[in-house]
Image (cartoon, helix red, strand yellow):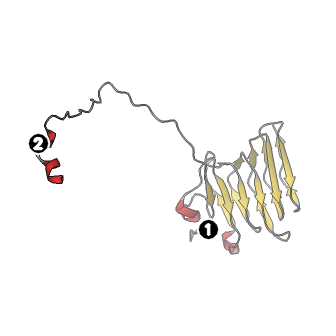
Amino acid sequence: MLRSLLSADWWVGRKVRRHLPLRNRTIEAAESRILLALRVWTGGAITNDRWSDKDNWEGDVVPVAGDDLEFPAGFISTDRGVVNDLGSVASKLRNITFRSGDYKVTGNPITLSGNLTVLGSSTEKVVIENDITFTAASHRITHQTLLELTGRLKNLTGTGEIRKAGTGALTIGGEFANT
């Protein structure tokens, strides 16, 4: 059977379909898409704890605008002092979650369109020294640990709310602006 299909006689009387030429066709660009992702801290860089170092993130991918960040439990204390050295655009994040206490965040200002969550025991403490700007109509700060926000807090919506939830104590050391 295969031999007969390959023989010249098989093609006799059959029409060969020609492909249409590509000229006079237009190509449209696809819409831009932003894939929101969860970036999980590993603290894998040997020489630093900077957010801009891909070795500090699972999958070796640095956070970009719109990402969720997670800082897991189980790290030694030297990996819990983290530095946001991302630029202002990349620091526009959705949510930040700390899975345990004893983290200290310093560096550039952070913009959040979502929530700040700190899990852990009541004896642990998370300190965020960065200025934080909230951009949505409603935000929740949920924590079971001691939480110190020592930078400036700003709510861009002017009429939005920031709600505290959880059993931990919250200390706001910086100024608070609702603009």
> How many numbered marks have been drawn onto this rendered protein structure?
2
Answer with the quarter of the image where residue 18 lies: top left
Which amino acid type is shown beneath numbered disc 1? Answer: Gly
Residue at image coords 71%, 55%: 96
Q: Outermost residue toward the bottom?
A: 76
> Residue reaching furthest top?
24
Looking at the image, which residue sits at the far left?
8
In the depicted structure, whether residue 41 falls above or below residue 116 = below
**How would you rate the neighbour count of disc 2 (Cα within 10 Å): few for under 14, some for 14-19, many for 20 or more?**
few
Task: Residue 158 in the image: state x and y as whole percent.
Answer: 82, 36
The image shows residue 3 at horizontal and vertical percentages of 14, 53
Question: Do the numbered discs 2 and 1 sit on residues whose CB atoms are within 8 Å?
Answer: no
The residue located at (20%, 34%) in the rendering is 16
Nearer the observer: mark 2 or 1; the answer is 2
What residue is drawn where x is 79% and y is 68%? 120
Counting from the top left corner in percent of width and height, residue 87 is at 61, 49
Q: Secondary structure at mark 2?
A: helix
Towards the viewer: 73 or 134: 73
Depth check: 51 or 95 in front? 95
Mark 1 lies on a secondary structure that is loop
Q: Which residue is mark 1?
A: 43
Residue 9 at what x, y percent from top left?
A: 11, 42
Say which amino acid is labelled 2: Asp
Residue behind mark 2: 9
Is residue 156 or residue 61 the one in the foreground? 61
